[in-house]
Protein backbone atom coordinates (compact mmCIF):
# COMPACT_ATOMS: atom_id res chain seq x y z
CA UNK A 1 0.00 0.00 0.00
CA UNK A 2 2.86 2.43 0.80
CA UNK A 3 4.46 1.78 -2.61
CA UNK A 4 1.14 2.38 -4.37
CA UNK A 5 0.61 5.64 -2.44
CA UNK A 6 4.13 6.87 -3.35
CA UNK A 7 3.56 6.07 -7.02
CA UNK A 8 0.26 7.97 -7.05
CA UNK A 9 1.82 11.03 -5.37
CA UNK A 10 4.69 10.99 -7.90
CA UNK A 11 2.29 10.80 -10.85
CA UNK A 12 0.23 13.69 -9.47
CA UNK A 13 3.34 15.87 -9.09
CA UNK A 14 4.53 15.08 -12.63
CA UNK A 15 1.11 15.94 -14.05
CA UNK A 16 1.01 19.27 -12.21
CA UNK A 17 4.32 20.53 -13.68
CA UNK A 18 3.23 20.88 -17.36
CA UNK A 19 -0.11 22.36 -16.30
CA UNK A 20 1.64 25.08 -14.29
CA UNK A 21 4.09 25.67 -17.13
CA UNK A 22 1.29 26.02 -19.67
CA UNK A 23 -0.59 28.39 -17.37
CA UNK A 24 2.53 30.54 -17.05
CA UNK A 25 2.93 30.60 -20.83
CA UNK A 26 -0.67 31.72 -21.33
CA UNK A 27 -0.32 34.41 -18.70
CA UNK A 28 2.85 35.72 -20.29
CA UNK A 29 1.32 35.71 -23.77
CA UNK A 30 -1.78 37.61 -22.74
CA UNK A 31 -0.11 39.95 -20.25
CA UNK A 32 0.33 43.69 -20.64
CA UNK A 33 3.43 45.70 -19.91
CA UNK A 34 4.70 49.28 -20.04
CA UNK A 35 8.37 50.14 -19.60
CA UNK A 36 9.95 53.59 -19.51
CA UNK A 37 13.71 54.10 -19.58
CA UNK A 38 15.79 57.26 -19.72
CA UNK A 39 19.02 57.48 -21.68
CA UNK A 40 21.22 60.57 -21.60
CA UNK A 41 24.65 59.57 -22.88
CA UNK A 42 27.21 62.09 -24.08
CA UNK A 43 26.75 61.01 -27.69
CA UNK A 44 22.94 61.15 -27.55
CA UNK A 45 20.88 64.16 -28.59
CA UNK A 46 20.71 67.28 -26.46
CA UNK A 47 17.06 66.73 -25.62
CA UNK A 48 17.82 63.56 -23.63
CA UNK A 49 14.54 61.96 -24.70
CA UNK A 50 13.27 58.93 -22.80
CA UNK A 51 12.41 55.64 -24.49
CA UNK A 52 9.32 53.55 -23.86
CA UNK A 53 8.18 50.01 -24.62
CA UNK A 54 4.59 48.86 -24.36
CA UNK A 55 2.75 45.63 -25.14
CA UNK A 56 -0.98 45.10 -25.03
CA UNK A 57 -4.26 45.29 -26.90
CA UNK A 58 -5.22 48.29 -29.05
CA UNK A 59 -8.21 49.97 -27.40
CA UNK A 60 -8.87 52.71 -29.97
CA UNK A 61 -7.40 54.18 -33.14
CA UNK A 62 -7.65 57.86 -34.10
CA UNK A 63 -6.00 59.92 -36.85
CA UNK A 64 -2.40 60.31 -35.72
CA UNK A 65 -2.67 58.28 -32.50
CA UNK A 66 -3.89 55.08 -30.85
CA UNK A 67 -4.40 53.84 -27.28
CA UNK A 68 -2.82 50.76 -25.68
CA UNK A 69 -3.39 49.93 -22.00
CA UNK A 70 -4.70 53.44 -21.41
CA UNK A 71 -1.54 54.99 -22.87
CA UNK A 72 -1.98 57.33 -25.86
CA UNK A 73 0.69 56.73 -28.49
CA UNK A 74 1.18 59.30 -31.24
CA UNK A 75 2.27 58.57 -34.81
CA UNK A 76 4.19 61.57 -36.16
CA UNK A 77 7.14 60.76 -38.40
CA UNK A 78 8.41 64.34 -38.10
CA UNK A 79 9.19 63.75 -34.41
CA UNK A 80 11.31 60.60 -34.78
CA UNK A 81 14.44 59.62 -36.70
CA UNK A 82 12.93 56.41 -38.07
CA UNK A 83 9.58 54.65 -38.18
CA UNK A 84 8.58 51.03 -38.79
CA UNK A 85 5.18 49.34 -38.80
CA UNK A 86 4.58 45.64 -39.39
CA UNK A 87 0.94 44.74 -39.96
CA UNK A 88 -2.27 46.76 -40.14
CA UNK A 89 -3.11 48.72 -37.00
CA UNK A 90 -6.69 48.07 -35.88
CA UNK A 91 -8.78 47.98 -32.71
CA UNK A 92 -8.47 44.70 -30.81
CA UNK A 93 -5.03 43.79 -32.15
CA UNK A 94 -2.18 42.83 -29.86
CA UNK A 95 0.84 45.05 -30.46
CA UNK A 96 4.36 45.69 -29.27
CA UNK A 97 5.42 49.33 -29.55
CA UNK A 98 8.74 51.08 -29.03
CA UNK A 99 9.32 54.80 -29.18
CA UNK A 100 10.48 57.99 -27.51
CA UNK A 101 8.90 60.48 -25.10
CA UNK A 102 8.91 64.16 -26.07
CA UNK A 103 7.09 66.81 -24.07
CA UNK A 104 5.27 64.09 -22.11
CA UNK A 105 3.97 62.50 -25.34
CA UNK A 106 4.71 58.96 -26.52
CA UNK A 107 5.82 58.92 -30.17
CA UNK A 108 5.99 55.50 -31.83
CA UNK A 109 9.13 54.42 -33.68
CA UNK A 110 8.39 50.72 -34.08
CA UNK A 111 4.88 49.18 -34.20
CA UNK A 112 4.65 45.41 -34.42
CA UNK A 113 1.15 43.95 -34.76
CA UNK A 114 1.41 40.45 -33.28
CA UNK A 115 0.34 37.57 -35.50
CA UNK A 116 -1.25 39.53 -38.34
CA UNK A 117 0.30 40.44 -41.68
CA UNK A 118 3.77 41.11 -40.32
CA UNK A 119 5.47 39.84 -43.46
CA UNK A 120 2.81 40.97 -45.95
CA UNK A 121 2.25 44.55 -44.76
CA UNK A 122 5.32 46.56 -43.82
CA UNK A 123 6.31 50.23 -43.76
CA UNK A 124 9.79 51.60 -43.09
CA UNK A 125 10.66 55.29 -43.07
CA UNK A 126 14.07 56.72 -42.33
CA UNK A 127 15.79 59.99 -43.01
CA UNK A 128 16.57 63.41 -41.63
CA UNK A 129 13.38 65.20 -40.66
CA UNK A 130 14.91 68.69 -40.23
CA UNK A 131 14.78 71.51 -42.73
CA UNK A 132 17.52 74.05 -43.31
CA UNK A 133 16.94 77.69 -42.36
CA UNK A 134 16.77 80.13 -45.28
CA UNK A 135 20.04 81.88 -46.08
CA UNK A 136 19.95 85.45 -47.51
CA UNK A 137 21.50 86.15 -50.91
CA UNK A 138 24.56 88.44 -51.00
CA UNK A 139 23.77 92.14 -51.48
CA UNK A 140 25.28 93.56 -54.70
CA UNK A 141 27.56 96.55 -54.22
CA UNK A 142 26.53 99.89 -55.86
CA UNK A 143 28.31 100.86 -59.06
CA UNK A 144 30.77 103.79 -58.74
CA UNK A 145 29.66 107.27 -59.78
CA UNK A 146 31.10 108.68 -62.98
CA UNK A 147 33.45 111.68 -62.66
CA UNK A 148 32.20 114.94 -64.22
CA UNK A 149 33.53 115.83 -67.66
CA UNK A 150 34.76 119.35 -68.39
CA UNK A 151 32.92 120.93 -71.29
CA UNK A 152 33.66 124.19 -73.08
CA UNK A 153 30.83 125.74 -71.12
CA UNK A 154 31.58 126.77 -67.55
CA UNK A 155 28.90 124.50 -66.00
CA UNK A 156 29.87 120.77 -65.40
CA UNK A 157 27.57 117.94 -66.42
CA UNK A 158 25.57 116.18 -63.65
CA UNK A 159 26.92 112.82 -62.44
CA UNK A 160 24.62 109.75 -62.74
CA UNK A 161 22.92 108.51 -59.58
CA UNK A 162 24.21 105.23 -58.03
CA UNK A 163 22.40 101.99 -58.85
CA UNK A 164 20.02 101.00 -56.00
CA UNK A 165 20.93 97.81 -54.14
CA UNK A 166 18.63 94.78 -54.40
CA UNK A 167 16.91 93.49 -51.27
CA UNK A 168 18.06 90.00 -50.17
CA UNK A 169 15.67 87.20 -51.10
CA UNK A 170 15.59 84.07 -48.88
CA UNK A 171 16.49 80.77 -50.45
CA UNK A 172 13.72 78.13 -50.53
CA UNK A 173 13.59 75.80 -47.55
CA UNK A 174 14.97 72.38 -48.35
CA UNK A 175 12.60 69.43 -48.17
CA UNK A 176 13.35 66.53 -45.78
CA UNK A 177 15.55 63.76 -47.16
CA UNK A 178 13.22 60.83 -46.54
CA UNK A 179 13.46 57.23 -47.72
CA UNK A 180 10.26 55.19 -47.47
CA UNK A 181 9.79 51.48 -48.18
CA UNK A 182 6.28 50.02 -48.43
CA UNK A 183 5.21 46.38 -48.83
CA UNK A 184 1.56 45.36 -49.18
CA UNK A 185 0.51 41.88 -50.30
CA UNK A 186 -3.02 40.55 -49.79
CA UNK A 187 -6.69 41.14 -50.57
CA UNK A 188 -7.51 44.51 -52.10
CA UNK A 189 -9.50 45.55 -49.02
CA UNK A 190 -6.54 45.01 -46.68
CA UNK A 191 -4.08 46.59 -49.11
CA UNK A 192 -6.30 49.68 -49.37
CA UNK A 193 -6.64 49.91 -45.58
CA UNK A 194 -2.88 49.65 -45.10
CA UNK A 195 -2.06 52.21 -47.81
CA UNK A 196 -4.53 54.65 -46.26
CA UNK A 197 -2.59 54.41 -43.00
CA UNK A 198 0.69 54.93 -44.87
CA UNK A 199 -0.59 58.05 -46.65
CA UNK A 200 -1.83 59.47 -43.35
CA UNK A 201 1.63 58.99 -41.82
CA UNK A 202 3.37 60.66 -44.79
CA UNK A 203 0.98 63.61 -44.93
CA UNK A 204 3.18 65.67 -42.60
CA UNK A 205 6.14 65.32 -44.95
CA UNK A 206 4.40 66.46 -48.14
Image (cartoon, rainbow, N blue to C red):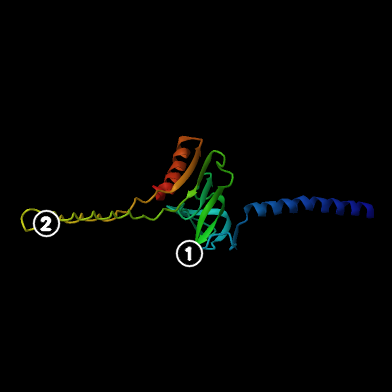
Visible residue check, residue 46: yes
Q: Position of residue 102 (x, y in %)?
A: 49, 61
Visible residue check, residue 1: no
Looking at the rendered image, the disc whose residue lies closer to the viewer, 2 or 1, is 2
Question: Residue 87 vs residue 135: left or right?
Answer: right
Q: Residues within 10 Å of mark 2 (few under 14, many from 20)?
A: few
Query: Which quadrant would residue 38 be assigned to in this image?
Result: bottom right
Is residue 32 positioned above or below 181 on the image?
below
Camera-side residue of 63 and 148: 148
Is residue 10 positioned above or below 195 on the image?
below
Q: Position of residue 82 (x, y in %)?
A: 52, 50
Q: Position of residue 107 (x, y in %)?
A: 50, 56
Camera-side residue of 72 and 47: 47
For image coordinates 52% across by 63% down, the residue present is 46
Mark seen at residue 158: 2
Mark seen at residue 103: 1
For image coordinates 55% across by 47% down, the residue present is 113
Mark 2 and mark 1 lie on one chain; the one further toward the N terminus is 1
Q: Which residue is most to the left?
A: 153
Marks 2/1: CA–CA distance: 66 Å
Tell me the element at label 2: loop
Query: Which quadrant would residue 28 be assigned to in this image?
Result: bottom right
Amino acid sequence: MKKIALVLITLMLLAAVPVAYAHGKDKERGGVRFELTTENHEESDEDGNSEFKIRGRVESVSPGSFVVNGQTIYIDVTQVNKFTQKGILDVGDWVKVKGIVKDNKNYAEDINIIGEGQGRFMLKIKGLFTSLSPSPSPTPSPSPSASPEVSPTPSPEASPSPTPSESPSPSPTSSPNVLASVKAVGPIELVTQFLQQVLAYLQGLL
